Image (cartoon, helix red, strand yellow):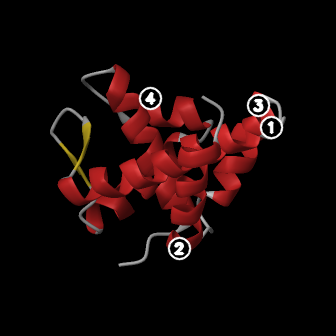
Amino acid sequence: MTIRESGEMYLETIYVLSQTSSTVRAIDVGAQMGFSKPSVSRAIGLLKRDGLVTTDGQGYIKLTEPGEKKAKVIYERHTLLSRLLMDLGVDEATASEDACRIEHYISEKTFDAIKRHVKEYGKK
Protein backbone atom coordinates (compact mmCIF):
# COMPACT_ATOMS: atom_id res chain seq x y z
CA MET A 1 0.00 0.00 0.00
CA THR A 2 1.34 3.37 -1.01
CA ILE A 3 0.17 6.30 1.05
CA ARG A 4 0.03 9.76 -0.47
CA GLU A 5 1.61 12.89 0.96
CA SER A 6 -1.68 14.12 2.44
CA GLY A 7 -2.21 10.79 4.22
CA GLU A 8 1.30 10.99 5.62
CA MET A 9 0.58 14.50 6.90
CA TYR A 10 -2.53 13.24 8.68
CA LEU A 11 -0.64 10.32 10.23
CA GLU A 12 2.12 12.62 11.44
CA THR A 13 -0.41 15.05 12.92
CA ILE A 14 -2.30 12.27 14.71
CA TYR A 15 1.01 10.95 16.04
CA VAL A 16 2.15 14.36 17.30
CA LEU A 17 -1.23 15.05 18.93
CA SER A 18 -1.21 11.61 20.58
CA GLN A 19 2.13 12.43 22.21
CA THR A 20 0.57 15.24 24.23
CA SER A 21 -2.99 13.94 24.70
CA SER A 22 -4.48 10.57 25.52
CA THR A 23 -7.32 11.27 23.08
CA VAL A 24 -7.26 12.56 19.52
CA ARG A 25 -10.42 13.53 17.67
CA ALA A 26 -11.04 14.64 14.10
CA ILE A 27 -11.71 18.16 15.35
CA ASP A 28 -8.23 18.24 16.93
CA VAL A 29 -6.63 17.07 13.69
CA GLY A 30 -8.57 19.66 11.68
CA ALA A 31 -7.61 22.46 14.06
CA GLN A 32 -3.93 21.47 13.98
CA MET A 33 -3.80 21.20 10.19
CA GLY A 34 -6.23 24.01 9.35
CA PHE A 35 -8.54 21.69 7.39
CA SER A 36 -12.33 21.48 7.35
CA LYS A 37 -14.29 18.75 9.09
CA PRO A 38 -15.36 17.12 5.79
CA SER A 39 -11.73 17.01 4.58
CA VAL A 40 -10.58 15.43 7.83
CA SER A 41 -13.46 12.93 7.82
CA ARG A 42 -12.59 11.81 4.30
CA ALA A 43 -8.91 11.45 5.11
CA ILE A 44 -9.61 9.52 8.31
CA GLY A 45 -11.93 7.24 6.34
CA LEU A 46 -9.16 6.50 3.85
CA LEU A 47 -6.65 5.86 6.64
CA LYS A 48 -9.16 3.51 8.30
CA ARG A 49 -9.70 1.69 5.01
CA ASP A 50 -5.94 1.21 4.71
CA GLY A 51 -5.70 -0.12 8.28
CA LEU A 52 -3.60 2.78 9.58
CA VAL A 53 -6.07 4.19 12.13
CA THR A 54 -9.13 3.09 14.05
CA THR A 55 -11.94 5.14 15.53
CA ASP A 56 -14.23 4.26 18.38
CA GLY A 57 -17.89 5.07 19.00
CA GLN A 58 -16.97 8.40 20.54
CA GLY A 59 -14.91 9.46 17.54
CA TYR A 60 -11.49 9.03 19.11
CA ILE A 61 -8.74 8.23 16.62
CA LYS A 62 -5.94 5.79 17.35
CA LEU A 63 -3.06 4.76 15.17
CA THR A 64 -2.87 1.05 14.46
CA GLU A 65 0.51 -0.65 14.78
CA PRO A 66 1.29 -0.15 11.06
CA GLY A 67 -0.05 3.41 11.26
CA GLU A 68 2.12 4.26 14.24
CA LYS A 69 5.17 2.72 12.57
CA LYS A 70 4.61 4.84 9.44
CA ALA A 71 3.89 7.97 11.50
CA LYS A 72 7.10 7.56 13.49
CA VAL A 73 9.12 7.31 10.27
CA ILE A 74 7.51 10.46 8.90
CA TYR A 75 8.01 12.33 12.19
CA GLU A 76 11.65 11.24 12.38
CA ARG A 77 12.21 12.51 8.86
CA HIS A 78 10.58 15.83 9.70
CA THR A 79 12.53 16.41 12.89
CA LEU A 80 15.89 15.33 11.48
CA LEU A 81 15.50 17.32 8.27
CA SER A 82 14.40 20.38 10.27
CA ARG A 83 17.45 20.01 12.50
CA LEU A 84 19.78 19.67 9.50
CA LEU A 85 18.36 22.77 7.83
CA MET A 86 18.64 24.78 11.06
CA ASP A 87 22.24 23.56 11.47
CA LEU A 88 22.84 25.05 8.01
CA GLY A 89 21.51 28.41 9.23
CA VAL A 90 17.89 28.27 8.09
CA ASP A 91 15.43 29.83 10.54
CA GLU A 92 13.19 27.40 12.44
CA ALA A 93 9.91 28.25 10.69
CA THR A 94 11.38 27.93 7.20
CA ALA A 95 13.31 24.77 8.15
CA SER A 96 10.14 23.13 9.46
CA GLU A 97 8.13 24.13 6.40
CA ASP A 98 10.80 22.91 3.97
CA ALA A 99 11.33 19.69 5.94
CA CYS A 100 7.59 19.03 5.66
CA ARG A 101 7.87 19.19 1.88
CA ILE A 102 11.04 17.11 1.63
CA GLU A 103 10.02 14.36 4.07
CA HIS A 104 7.39 12.98 1.71
CA TYR A 105 9.62 12.64 -1.33
CA ILE A 106 13.10 11.80 -0.13
CA SER A 107 14.21 8.21 -0.73
CA GLU A 108 14.98 5.92 2.17
CA LYS A 109 18.55 5.57 0.88
CA THR A 110 19.13 9.34 0.85
CA PHE A 111 17.46 9.82 4.22
CA ASP A 112 19.65 7.12 5.77
CA ALA A 113 22.74 8.89 4.40
CA ILE A 114 21.55 12.21 5.87
CA LYS A 115 20.86 10.50 9.19
CA ARG A 116 24.39 9.07 9.28
CA HIS A 117 25.85 12.46 8.36
CA VAL A 118 23.88 14.32 11.04
CA LYS A 119 24.84 11.72 13.64
CA GLU A 120 28.51 12.09 12.80
CA TYR A 121 28.81 15.79 11.96
CA GLY A 122 25.67 17.54 13.22
CA LYS A 123 25.75 20.24 15.85
CA LYS A 124 25.65 18.86 19.33
Label 1 vs label 2, nearer the camera: 2
Amino acid identity at mark 1: Thr
Which element is circle 2 on? helix
Which residue carries the number 3 mark?
93
The quarter of the displayed image where residue 20 is located: top left
Which element is circle 3 on? helix
Residue placed most toward the observer, 1 or 108:
108
Which residue carries the number 2 mark?
109
Which element is circle 1 on? helix
Apparent side of residue 27 relative to residue 18 in the rendered image (left or right): right
Which residue carries the number 4 mark?
28
Label 4 vs label 3, nearer the camera: 3
Q: CA distance from mark 2 to mark 4?
A: 34 Å
* Vertical arrangement, residue 124 with respect to residue 83, above or below: above
Q: Earlier in the sequence, mark 1 or mark 2?
A: 1
Q: Are marks 1 and 3 in contact (CB under 8 Å)?
A: yes
Residue under the image location 84 percent in, 35 percent down: 89
